[in-house]
Amino acid sequence: MARHEGGLCPHNAGSPGAKVGAPTMNGSLRLDGPAWAMLVGLAILWGGSFVLVEVILEEMPVITLVALRVSLAAVTLWAAVALTGGPIPRRAEVWGAFIMLGVFNNLVPFSLIVWGQTAVTASVAAILNATTPLFTALFATVALSDEKLTAQRAAGLGLGLLGVAVMIGPRAILALGSDIPHQLAVLGAAVSYGFAAVYARRFHRLGVTPMMVATGQLTASSLIIVPVALGAYGVGVLASASIGAWVAVIALACFATALAYILYFSILRRAGATNVALVTVLVPLVAVLLGVIVLGEALGMLELAGMALIFAGLATIDGRLLPFLARRVGVGRHRA
């Protein structure tokens, strides 16, 4: 029987969920090939969300944006559930967990990040958001027996966060601390995301699929925030928004939220809470690469150095590249 550790998540290496993914020799979960592919896909989807939010904020208030994001995403996922015929949970325990997750994985972080971006740039928000794996690792160390924070993982997370800061540039780094309340809001979102990732590990034990977890949490958060948004601003703000703003809202809801959360919970089930949180380190890297590929932007030395640090951090966390290189070097010396 699984032990309940830390009160956050009754799911550990002794439960059936520990068989999902690629465990290391010490029993902790690790990213395998499919999980890495999904993580990159998730980073691409969430990489565009910061820009979409900035576009929408020019025409809609924070609470309306968040309400539209979660409610349209929930409608999209319910349509997908209806088409696929997936099982719909009816137990009170499951829906209570959906409410908890909807608050800490949607309402709190979405609201804090969007409010934070009313005063801080997307670059600064990305740096602060990239601390999510650190908070996730701390919560996981307390609550999960199969995701303890090791020295190797801590070093990798540190390299990754340093890489994000270097890649985004000294101007963004110097801006840290210039608007404390709004920056603390974005940092608070990272803490909330970290707690939610660990809490969500319980859904595999409850027998809930990744699509239904995404649908349930977004439904719960919609039921909470939509009435609040309507009471605060009504529907007039929706009618006055431009077509461009609505295109951004739909893209944010359907792709950067609905589809993204299906990937998120699939990675969570397969590789664990700390690993899925690494997406926040990849998001700035993806944004820079998209600028090069789509917009033809040039890569400077800071971007290249930052990318190298991020890749070094991810390789350290993964734990397979360095032993592989050591073996290759050993084989080369033996042949020589």
Image (cartoon, helix red, strand yellow):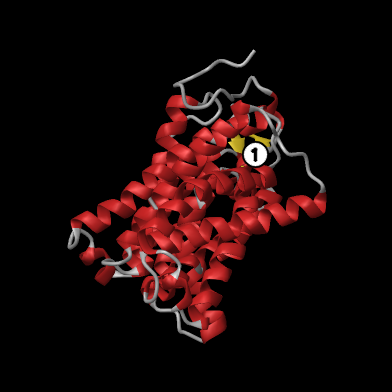
Residue ID at (37%, 64%): 233
The amino acid type found where label 1 is placed reads: Arg
- Disc 1: which residue: 269
Where's residue 329, x and y in %? 60, 50
Badge 1 density bin: few <14, some 14–19, many ≥20, Cα 10 Å: many
Where's residue 58, x and y in %? 37, 76
Name, please, the residue furthest toward the top: 1
- What element does badge 1 sit on? helix
In the image, 262 versus 25, the foreground residue is 262
Where's residue 232, x and y in %? 36, 59
In this rendering, the answer to whether 224 lies above or below 239 is above
Where's residue 95, x and y in %? 59, 34
Q: Is residue 20 visible?
A: yes
Residue ID at (26%, 51%): 184
In this rendering, the answer to whether 3 lies above or below 311 is above
Count of number-bearing discs:
1
Residue ID at (29%, 52%): 185
In the image, 230 versus 301, the foreground residue is 230
In this rendering, the answer to whether 229 lies above or below 170 is above
Residue ID at (44%, 21%): 6
Quarter of the view holding residue 303: bottom left
Q: Is residue 322 visible?
A: no
In the image, 230 versus 278, the foreground residue is 230
Taking the image as shown, residue 235 lies to the left or right of residue 218, namely: left
Quarter of the view holding residue 72: bottom right
In the image, 227 versus 241, the foreground residue is 227
Identify the image quadrant of the N terminus. top right
